[in-house]
Image (cartoon, rainbow, N blue to C red):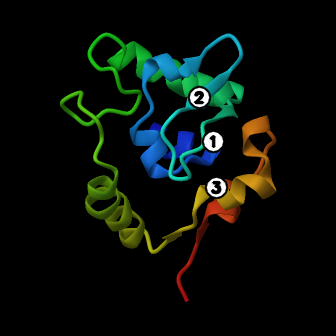
Amino acid sequence: MPYAEFSILTGLRFGNLAGLRWPDIDWLSQLTHLWETKSDKQFSVELCDRAIALLRAQHDTWGDKSEWCWPNSKGGRLDSPHFRQRVWAPAFKRAGLVWHDPRHARKEGTASLGKSFDSRELFWSRPN
């Protein structure tokens, strides 16, 4: 699932991913600019080559159909709480996994720098 992989690589919150628009992507500098954040602070996130490749594939599919990088099935803005509750959480539950927030694991794994790691070790665990 490209959305999940991009989330892991960037460490972005669901809301930031849902609000990401094509003009927010600086393809040459390999950055994404976040204008609306939970903390009301604007910032940029470095994108590794794999994250850029995922965005290019999304752009090939949605670039001329939606302003959103990760749109819903109709091209509109993804409703992140709805997506988390109705799609994401049930998928992890079926797999017997618990999702750990990628923002914290990213700090340890430096995934945005393209370092190799076993994502299962950093981001998923079996529930107790």
- Please, what is the three-letter code of the amino acid marked with disc 2? His
- Please, what is the three-letter code of the amino acid marked with disc 3? Arg
Q: Which mark is residue 103?
A: 3
Measured as percent of width and height from the top left, residue 107 is found at 76, 54
Which residue is found at the position 57% from the left and 66% from the top?
100
Q: Which mark is residue 10?
A: 1
Single out the residue that lies furthest toward the bottom: 128
Q: Is residue 76 left or right of residue 23?
A: left
Mark 1 crowd level (few <14, some 14–19, many ≥20, 10 Å Cα): many
Measured as percent of width and height from the top left, residue 89 is found at 37, 66
Front position in the image: 83 or 20? 20
Residue 58 shows in the view? yes
Measured as percent of width and height from the top left, residue 83 is found at 30, 53
User: Which residue carries the number 2 mark?
Assistant: 33
Q: For mark 1, give the secondary structure.
A: helix
Which residue is found at the position 64% from the left and 42% from the top?
9
